[in-house]
Image: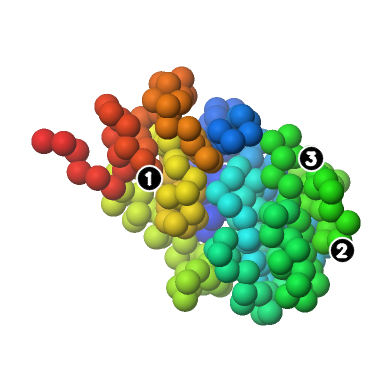
Amino acid sequence: MAPARPVVPADLLAAVLRRDAAGPLVTHYDDRTGERVELSAATLANWVAKTANLLQDEFDVGPGSRVAVALPVHWQTAAVLLGVWSCGAAVVDTPAEDDGGLDDVDVVLAEQDRVAAVEELGVEELLGLSLHPLGAGMTGYAGAARDFALEVRVHGDHFVPYGPVDPAGPGLLLAGLELSLGGLVDVAGELADRLGVRAGDRVLVDARAAEEAGPVAWLLAPLAAGASLVVCRHPASDQLKRRAEAEGVTATLGLGLDGIRELGRPAPS
């Protein structure tokens, strides 16, 4: 019997796990800090489960909840987004230049540099993320926000939502656009086709361009197509070509490299 067609975002990750749990799924570089972090599908799924359990058990996140994500494009952000969607909740995307509009959300997850600004808005349920390459907690912070890294590690490695996840429920609120959980999967598949993402692609993603494109483009579309990601934050242009060769990159998103297919651009004639 063929596997069931993905219906909600959690199904996309489940499909990757069935296909190749051990292979690299998300590789993250930050050329400002020199970090490189690689996650297999199994490791990402572990982070997703722990995040979903944290949100469900400690913040009562479930269908109908609204979770603001004030995070850059990052491997931990991938886990947070998929964790929220695993709970059946909606992600309220919060651009770096705008921490307003958080008065109607149930919980906020913010990078440490933005925690103070979010606190000033009177947000009560707040998790701060250090984005440390090894998942360490925040340093030099003494406010009331709970530390994601410290909280998440004590939660279970497997997640079961308290109630069924409704594909028709809200999944993403972004710049006035609302997509259902099922709509996220549909749009991801359509976008993957339009961009030209292929099964088995290793996609090099420029984090700044990905942030502008949104999580459907940089995360869900590659998952829907059966591709893996190499995310580059603060990329050093003189290293990208060598990195692409070392990582077996077959396509790029948001940047051009000689000899490598750029997604969304017609092939040269």
Q: Does label 3 or label 1 sit earlier along the sequence?
A: 3
Position of 13 relative to 162 (above/below): above
Mark 3 lies on a secondary structure that is loop
Task: Report x, y in % for residue 103.
Answer: 68, 79
Identify the residue shown where x is 61% and y is 29%: 34
Q: Is residue 180 visible?
A: no
Q: Does label 3 or label 2 sit earlier along the sequence?
A: 3
Position of 66 relative to 58 (above/below): below
Q: Is residue 115 left or right of residue 211?
A: right
Q: How is the image coloured?
A: rainbow
Q: Does label 1 or label 2 sit earlier along the sequence?
A: 2
Identify the residue shown where x is 42% and y is 21%: 242
Of residues 67 and 98, which is closer to you in this image?
98
Query: Looking at the rendering, which quadrant does residue 165 occupy?
Result: bottom right
Q: Which residue is mark 1?
A: 254
Screen quadrant of the C terminus: top left
Q: Is residue 179 visible?
A: yes
Badge 3, how many Cα within 10 Å: few under 14, some, many 20+? some
Amino acid type at circle 3 is Ala
Of residues 150 and 228, which is closer to you in this image?
150
Amino acid type at circle 1 is Gly
Distance between the alpha carbons at the discs numbered 3 and 1:
29 Å
Identify the residue shown where x is 65% and y is 46%: 76
Q: How many marks?
A: 3
Identify the residue shown where x is 74% and y is 61%: 115
Q: Which residue is mark 3?
A: 136
Q: Are marks 3 and 1 in contact (CB under 8 Å)?
A: no
The disc label shown at residue 144, or none: 2
Q: Are marks 3 and 2 in contact (CB under 8 Å)?
A: no
Of residues 83 and 158, which is closer to you in this image?
83
